[in-house]
Amino acid sequence: MALYKLLHILSVVIWVGGMFFAYMVLRPGIGQLLKLPERMRLWDRVFNRFFKWVWLAVFLLLATGFYMIYLYGGMSSMPRFIHLMLLSGIVMMLIFVYIFFGCYVHFNQLVEEKEWHQAEEKLVTIRKLVAVNLFIGLLTIAVAIIGRG
């Protein structure tokens, strides 16, 4: 059981911590230093690497989360905070899937085509959705800690 909890928590740290770093540290740090083309190329490379880790985190969160629920007797025996964690996690995953397929794939294409202003518009959408996911992620962590009492 400890291994599943460890993988679950590490996945949360990688995903939510990565969003926090990108949103609160990297974004404001590079915004004034780099010109538009360099900024778009940097974000494209950052997303390319980070999203691979997020896909792994999503897989591990689902696999370990559902397995631990199974080991503890199923959803009917879970306290409410577990239900809230599962719901918020699924919402976060759906938002991420939209960020990836609905925004990032197009953003990547725009960067490759050197359509900098259109890429920047797509980046604004990604940034807003990451902010929503970061908020939900931090709230989910609070639910996990407070719910355990």
Image (spheres, rainbow, N blue to C red):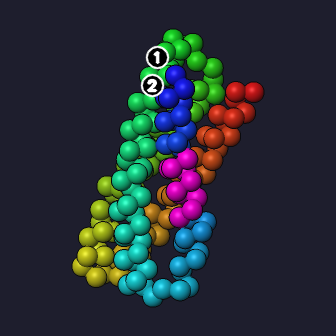
**Which amino acid does the dot numbered 1 rest on?**
Tyr
* Secondary-structure class at tag 1: helix
In the image, what residue occupies the spot 65% across and 34% down? Answer: 144
Name the amino acid type tagged 2: Phe
Tell me, yes or no, whether the two marked residues, 1 and 2, touch with CB atoms within 8 Å.
yes
Residue shown at the point (42%, 50%) measured from the top left? 54
Q: Name the residue beneath numbered marker 2.
A: 66
Number of other residues with Cα within 10 Å of mark 2, as a class: few under 14, some 14 to 19, many 20 or more: some
Q: What x and y, as percent, mark residue 110?
A: 29, 74
Q: What residue appears at the point 37 percent right and 61 percent down from the top-left corner? A: 49
**Residue pictured at 63% horizontal, 28% vertical:** 81
Separation of disc 1 and disc 2 at Cα? 6 Å
Q: Is residue 15 magenta?
A: yes
Residue 62 horizontal/vertical position (percent): 43, 33
For residue 102, say whether it is visible.
yes
Up the image or down, 33 lies above or below 132; here it is below
For the record, the magenta segment spans: 13-22
Q: Quadrant of residue 148?
A: top right
**To which residue does mark 1 refer?**
70
Residue 132 appearing in the image: no
Magenta region, mostly helix, strand or loop?
Answer: helix
